Amino acid sequence: MTEFFTALSEYTFLQNAIIACLLASVSCGVIGSYVVVKKISFLTGGIAHSVLAGMGMAYFYNVSPILGAIIAALVSSILIGWINLRWKEHEDVLIAAFWSAGMAIGILFLSRTPGYNVDLMSYLFGNILLITESDLLLMLVLDVVVFSIVMVCYKHFLVSVFDEEFAKLHGINTEFFYILLLCLISITIVILIQLVGLILVIALLTLPAAIANQYVTSLYKMFFLSAIVCAVISIGGVAISYEPDLPTGSVIVLLACASYFISVFIKQFINNRSSG
C-alpha cells in the first residue's frame, strides 16, 4: 500500500484514476439510489448489456466507442422503458431478449471489424489506469447533466418512485419521468464502464446504494452516503490492485460485494442486539 501512495504522488495516470473514481461516485450515488429503491436492477442490466451493440457498431464504422455506447444506452433505455410500461406481464422475458440481442449484435459487428482492438477489453472489463484527461472531461460533463436533471426534477422523481398513484392523481406524467430516469441510468452506466467495464457495471451501480439504504431512510441522505461508499470502494480497489498488478475493475467489484455482505451482517447484528 505504501508503494501505491508513493506512485500516486508521481504518476499522472494514477491521479487520473482517483479523479475518475470521485467523478463516477457522483452519478453512481444518485442514480444507484433510484435503482435500488425502485428495484429495477434486472431492467438496468438489460440496458447495460445492450450497450455492446452500440460499441460494436462504433468499432465497425471506426467512430468513438463511447459515442456508440451513449447512443445505444439511450435508445435501449427508451425502448426497454416503453416495453416495461406497455407489456409488464412479459417484462422479464423481454428484458432478457434485449440483454441477449444487444450482446449478440455487438459481437457480430466486432467479428466483422478488421484486426483486433485492445481498447475493447478495457471497455468490457474496465481499465481505470488508462483513463485520460479527455475521458475525465467527458465524465464531468455527464455528471453535470445527470446531477442537474435530478436536482431540477427531484420532487417529481421522488413522488413517482415512492407513490406512483399519488403522482398520477396530481397530474404528474409518471411515464415520462420513468423513461427519463432510465435515460439517466444509461448515462451513468457509460460513466461506470470506464471504471469496471461493461460486464461488471451493475455491481458498482447497485451495491453502494444498497449499503447506504440499510442505514438511512431519506433518499437525499442516501444519495450522499451512497456516493461516499462508492468513492471509498473504488479508490480502495485501485489501491489494493496496484502493487500485485491485479485487474482493477474486478478488485473494485469484489470489494463492493465484500462490503455489502459485511454491511448486511453488521446491520443484522445491530438489529438483533436492539431487539434483544
Image (cartoon, helix red, strand yellow):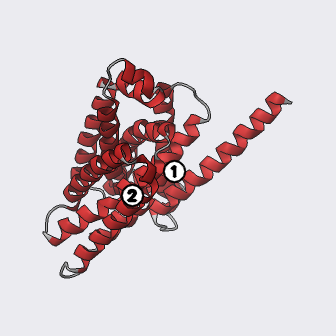
Secondary-structure class at tag 1: helix
Q: Mark 2 — residue? A: 94
The answer to whether residue 78 is above or below residue 249 is above
* Residue at image coords 48%, 28%: 162
Secondary-structure class at tag 2: helix
The answer to whether residue 143 is above or below residue 220 is below
The amino acid sitting under disc 1 is: Gly
Q: Nearer the viewer, residue 103 or 238?
A: 103
**Mark 1 or 2, nearer chain start:** 2
Return the mark for residue 172: none
**Residue 64 seen anywhere in this rendered image of the structure:** yes
Q: Residues within 10 Å of mark 1 (few under 14, many from 20)?
A: some
Split into 4 quadrants, where in the image is the C terminus? top right
Q: Would you identify the image quadrant in which residue 180 lies?
A: top left
Q: Residues within 10 Å of mark 2 (few under 14, many from 20)?
A: some
Question: How many numbered callouts?
Answer: 2
Residue 216 horizontal side relative to residue 192, left or right: right
Q: CA distance from mark 1 to mark 2?
A: 37 Å
* Percent x, y of residue 234: 47, 50
Q: Nearer the viewer, residue 22 or 175?
A: 175
Q: Mark 1 — residue? A: 236
* Percent x, y of residue 222: 50, 31
Residue 66 horizontal side relative to residue 16, left or right: left
* Residue at image coords 46%, 52%: 42
The answer to whether residue 58 is above or below residue 236 is below
* Residue at image coords 70%, 38%: 267
* Percent x, y of residue 77: 31, 49
Q: Are marks 1 and 2 in contact (CB under 8 Å)?
A: no
Which label sits in the foreground, 1 or 2?
2
The amino acid sitting under disc 2 is: Leu
* Percent x, y of residue 60: 17, 72
